[in-house]
Amino acid sequence: MGRTFDFDRETAVRPLGDGRYESRLDRAWWVHRGPNGGYLAAIVLRALTEAVGDPTRSPRSLTVHYAAPPAEDVLEIATTIERAGRSLTSCSARLTQDGKLIGLALGAFSQARPGPGFSDLRPPAAPPVEDSPVIEPPTDDPFIPDIAFRWENRMVRGAVPGEPTGEAVTTRWIRLPEGRVVDGLVAAAITDAAIPAVFGRVEEQIIVPTVDLTIHFRSSLPLPDAEPDDYVLADFRTNVVAEGFLEEDGAIWSPDGVLLAQSRQLAAVLPMPNS
């Protein structure tokens, strides 16, 4: 790809004291109006993880509301531990840039709890990684955002913009090109990493900026046997587009079918800038 990436550097936060952190946003994660929502979710999750300060408590839930797109500059994250109980820590964060509200977040962290368990969910049918073609974004298209080059994607199912398939589904094998184990931070970014599923149903040139994103982490991450070069299977589906908004439901699976995370986001439907 001809580019050098470093997820940990790009999502790093620097403590400022009193539960406040700052992060310098990286252009590699830009979409059309600002940075990708999953990227911002990973940054705020990192800040909340540091604020919680307990490696035995894994992220279980994260919700981010995106109030405004930030510029390519420093983002400040002010965290609050709302309550730290015997087994669950509830926390919040306020994202600002130059005094302007960018986003609000709520998180929950906990150890794994003993008790009954089952999963009726199954990963979608997918060919092996090596039999799934690599998706190479065109380098000569001015409307291709920077983030299109940030992930390694292999096609399983779904459309690309301008080539609808008749169903609002996007399924990909996906990983970071630099080799990085999928922990909670990477999983958070993956929930908003693929081409939006809506492009399988529409021909219009649109963008779909995230309004809110909720992630439920269904496994303590990283999994014990996770490897840096592993792809994960990411599946996204949209069922309703109405009054200028859509929902997208996502699920991320390990290579051997362990459910890592589920997500739901509400996104606005806007015309492509300058289109």
Image (tube, rainbow, N blue to C red):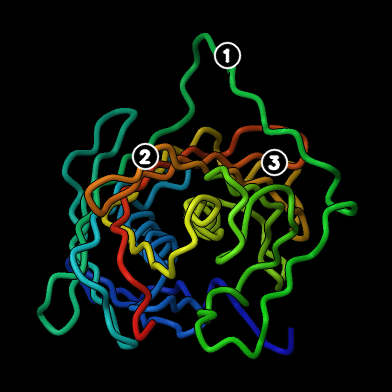
Q: How much space separates mark 1 and mark 3, taking CA atoms?
A: 17 Å
Q: Nearer the viewer, mark 3 or mark 2?
A: 2
Q: Amino acid at mark 2?
A: Val
Hey, which residue is sitting farthest right in the picture? 131
State the residue position of label 2. 240
Identify the element where label 1 is drawn: loop
Residue at point 84% right, 42% down? 127
Residue 167 is drawn in which quadrant?
top right
Residue at point 45% right, 32% down? 111
State the residue position of label 3. 254
Residue 138 in the image: state x and y as whole percent. 67, 81
Q: Is residue 25 visible?
A: yes
217 left or right, relative to 15: right
Q: Earlier in the sequence, mark 3 or mark 2?
A: 2
Q: Nearer the viewer, mark 1 or mark 2?
A: 2
Q: Earlier in the sequence, mark 1 or mark 2?
A: 1
Identify the element where label 2 is drawn: loop
Residue at point 69% right, 41% down? 254
Q: Pointer 1: residues within 10 angstroms few (<14), some, or many (20+)?
A: few
247 left or right, relative to 93: right
Position above or below: 50 against 255: below
Q: How much space separates mark 1 and mark 2, taking CA atoms?
A: 29 Å
Q: Quadrant of the N terminus?
A: bottom right
